[in-house]
Amino acid sequence: MTDSRLQEAVGQLKEAGVRITPQRHAVLEYLLNAEIHPTADDIYKALEGKFPNMSVATVYNNLRVFREIGLVRELTYGDASSRFDCNTSKHYHIICESCGKIVDFHYPSLDEVESLAEQVTGFNVSHHRMEIYGVCKSCQEEKQKVTQ
């Protein structure tokens, strides 16, 4: 992640009148650097050593602020904990049924689905989401080791 992306996000927070506390900065930086789509608990565990007085509630409150400003998207899949995604552009997710890993992918042709749905139904479409489920390469390899 480039520092410019972090500075841009900090700028958005300042424009919205949000105070930049050290904890808030750390949560934001962690999210922007995350290879995964972390849960609030993942973020808390990653930062608790650096901020021993920070609570899980602090993490949730910061995530709520980031979501309201449009810096992150909250992903809810089934009964699992919400995960948070700093990539707010249009994209889809593929989810490992074994380990829960979520990977982004973009398929521009699917954007046409919204206009087709509007034409067919007369609805005013606001958005859509799609998840694909399977087993990631790491879990496939792990399963092969066990069965050999």
Image: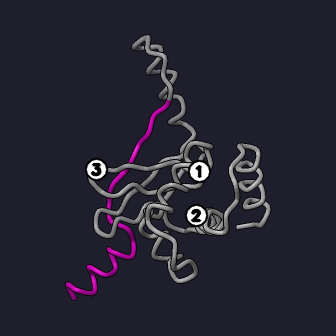
- Report the residue that reaches farthest toward the front: 53
Quadrant of the image for the N terminus? bottom right
Q: Position of residue 120 (x, y in %)?
A: 41, 14
Q: Position of residue 44 (x, y in %)?
A: 47, 71
At x 55%, y 47%, the residue is 67
Depth order, front residue of 16/41? 16
The answer to whether the residue labelled 3 contacts the one labelled 2, judged by CB atoms less than 8 Å apart, is: no
Q: Position of residue 127 (x, y in %)?
A: 49, 31
* Label of residue 31 in the image: 2
Q: Position of residue 63 (x, y in %)?
A: 53, 54
**Residue 145 located within the stretch drawn in magenta:** yes
At x 33%, y 55%, the residue is 133
Q: Magenta region: which residues?
A: 127-148
Depth order, front residue of 97/58? 58
**Circle 3: element type:** loop
The answer to whether the residue labelled 2 contacts the one labelled 1, judged by CB atoms less than 8 Å apart, is: yes
Q: Please, what is the three-letter code of the amino acid marked with disc 1?
A: Phe
Q: Please, what is the three-letter code of the amino acid marked with disc 3?
A: Gly
Q: Which of the two marks, 3 or 2, is nearer to us in this view?
A: 2
Residue identified by numbered label 3: 78
* Label of residue 66 in the image: 1
Task: Assess disc 2: are there few (<14), some (14-19) or many (≥20) residues with their C-alpha within 10 Å of its C-alpha.
Answer: many
Separation of residues labelled 2 and 1 (CA atoms): 10 Å
